[in-house]
Image (cartoon, rainbow, N blue to C red):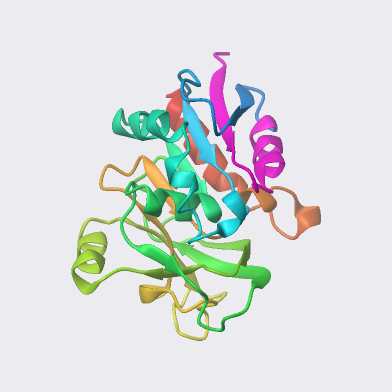
């Protein structure tokens, strides 16, 4: 079986790097390795993951300093070539700061850090990250963030909606998206978005923490299975 190469980028302050490494390592077809943020020439990978955490202590804004790390030029080129790039939580924030995804992540509307399981609805199966999901499938995933409120202006939101670039929305267990099911105040209940080509995904929930029933959910496996199946095809 061909070996897929997966990079987990490590910034100062990353704290979900091991979780992402472990999640990918569950798939025997993968060769996963850490890439340090100062490595300007990390080599070619089939998939790159930007994990959660508090890169550079979240000084200035979440992801604002990490955006200038030497490794980012290679990450931008990776995305430009159409290869899968997944940013989780702080990784999502970095993708927005780097201009790889539109919009920004603000303080939660409660102004408190939230750590809990939530439900999100898969809005499309037409992507390398959601092809293993059923249309409209509700996933149980954990969140852990203080600045997870997704914001974009009205024109950008229309573009995301019209282009099918909404990956996940916060919802109730029955799949209904509502203000009550929105943990942080994100516009349009957005929990994750794609770039226009759908090879870049940023999401606030942590699929790498939902890989085993003993952790409360196995639903995160669907994102990893989708992504790795896509690059294996």
Residue 81 sits in which quadrant?
top left
Is 23 contained in the magenta span?
yes
Q: Nearer the viewer, residue 158 or 61?
A: 61
* Residue located farthest toward the right when viewing the structure as drawn: 214
Q: Which residues are magenta?
A: 1-25
Quick check: 152 above or below 11?
A: below
Q: Is 45 placed left or right of 30 in the picture?
A: left
Q: Quadrant of the N terminus?
A: top right
Quick check: 183 above or below 14?
A: below
- Residue at the image point whose x is 51% and y is 59% from the top: 62
How far across and how far down the image is residue 131, in percent? 43, 44
Q: Nearer the viewer, residue 44 or 222?
A: 44
* Residue located farthest toward the front when viewing the structure as drawn: 60
- Residue at the image point whose x is 33% and y is 62% from the top: 103
- Residue at the image point whose x is 67% and y is 47% from the top: 16
Is 225 contained in the magenta span?
no
Total numbered badges shown on the rendered structure = 0
How far across and how far down the image is residue 27, in percent? 65, 30
How far across and how far down the image is residue 25, in percent? 68, 30
- Residue at the image point whose x is 70% and y is 33% from the top: 26
Residue 150 sits in which quadrant?
bottom left
One can see residue 217 in this view? yes
Residue 23 sits in which quadrant?
top right
One can see residue 133 in this view? no
Q: Is 21 placed left or right of 4 in the picture?
A: right
How far across and how far down the image is residue 111, in percent? 57, 81
């Amino acid at each position: 079986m061909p070996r897929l190469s997966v990079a987990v980028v490590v910034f100062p302050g990353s704290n979900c790097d091991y979780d992402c490494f472990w999640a990918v390592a569950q798939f025997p077809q993968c060769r996963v390795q850490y890439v340090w943020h100062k490595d300007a020439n990390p080599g070619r990978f089939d998939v790159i993951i930007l994990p959660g955490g508090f890169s550079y202590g979240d000084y200035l804004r979440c992801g604002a300093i990490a955006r200038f790390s030497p490794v980012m030029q290679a990450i931008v080129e990776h995305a430009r070539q159409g290869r899968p790039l997944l940013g989780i939580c702080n990784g999502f924030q970095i993708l927005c700061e780097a201009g790889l995804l539109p919009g920004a992540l603000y303080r939660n509307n409660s102004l408190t850090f939230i750590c809990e399981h939530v439900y999100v609805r898969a809005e499309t199966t037409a992507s390398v990250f959601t092809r293993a999901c059923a249309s409209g499938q509700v996933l149980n995933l954990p969140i852990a963030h203080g600045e997870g409120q997704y914001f974009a202006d009205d024109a950008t939101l229309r573009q995301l909606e019209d282009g099918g670039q909404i990956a996940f929305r916060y919802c109730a267990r029955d799949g209904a998206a509502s203000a009550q099911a929105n943990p942080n105040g994100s516009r349009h209940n957005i929990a994750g978005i794609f770039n226009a080509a759908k090879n870049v995904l940023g999401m606030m929930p942590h699929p790498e923490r939902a890989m085993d029933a003993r952790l409360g959910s196995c639903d995160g496996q669907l994102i990893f299975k989708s992504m790795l199946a896509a690059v294996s095809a």
